[in-house]
Image (cartoon, rainbow, N blue to C red):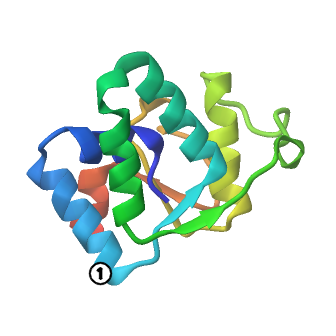
Amino acid sequence: MLDSNILISIAIFDSEQLGNLLENICQNHQLVISSTIIDEINNVMERKFPDKQYAMEKFLYKIPYEYVYISDNMINKQKIKIRDPNDIPILYSAIITNVDIFITGDKDFENLHIERPEILKPLEFLNKY
């Protein structure tokens, strides 16, 4: 699973490293994107990049991924402690979907001690896989 910040960066910024990341995932792994991630992408795009919303939609249409719907009642906001409470639904979507790896650039996910998924930064993933 890729976090919204990674997906947005791949879609609207020209980064060779992130392009390599997406290529690796699409060729060698199964990308999973949850409804929670899509909702966050839409909110960020509307606030920060309104002129690039169509490009984001087009990007999501073109890449292969498994979509998983996560309802609010599936998220236990009391169980995991994280600095930014807005990140709890994102983390739970990765846990609930039972993905092996969650790739993010968000520092709030650092130093979380959970068994699964493995939380990696893009470069860590590329170096390891």
Nearer to me, 113 or 33: 33
Which residue shows up at 68% across the image and 35% down it? 88
Q: Amino acid at mark 1?
A: Gln
**Would you call the spot at circle 1 few (<14 residues within 10 Å), some (14-19), or many (20 or more)?**
few
Residue 13 found in image quarter: top left
Residue 66 found in image quarter: bottom right
Nearer to me, 101 or 1: 1
Which residue shows up at 82% across the image and 34% down it? 77
In the displayed image of the protein, which residue is found farthest to the right? 73
39 relative position to 122: left or right: right
> In the image, residue 56 lies at what x, y percent?
36, 43
115 relative position to 106: left or right: right
Which residue shows up at 30% across the image and 25% down it? 51
> In the image, residue 104 lies at what x, y percent?
41, 45
Tell me the quarter of the image containing the C terminus: bottom left
Question: To which residue does mark 1 refer?
Answer: 27
Q: Is 77 situated above or below 23?
A: above
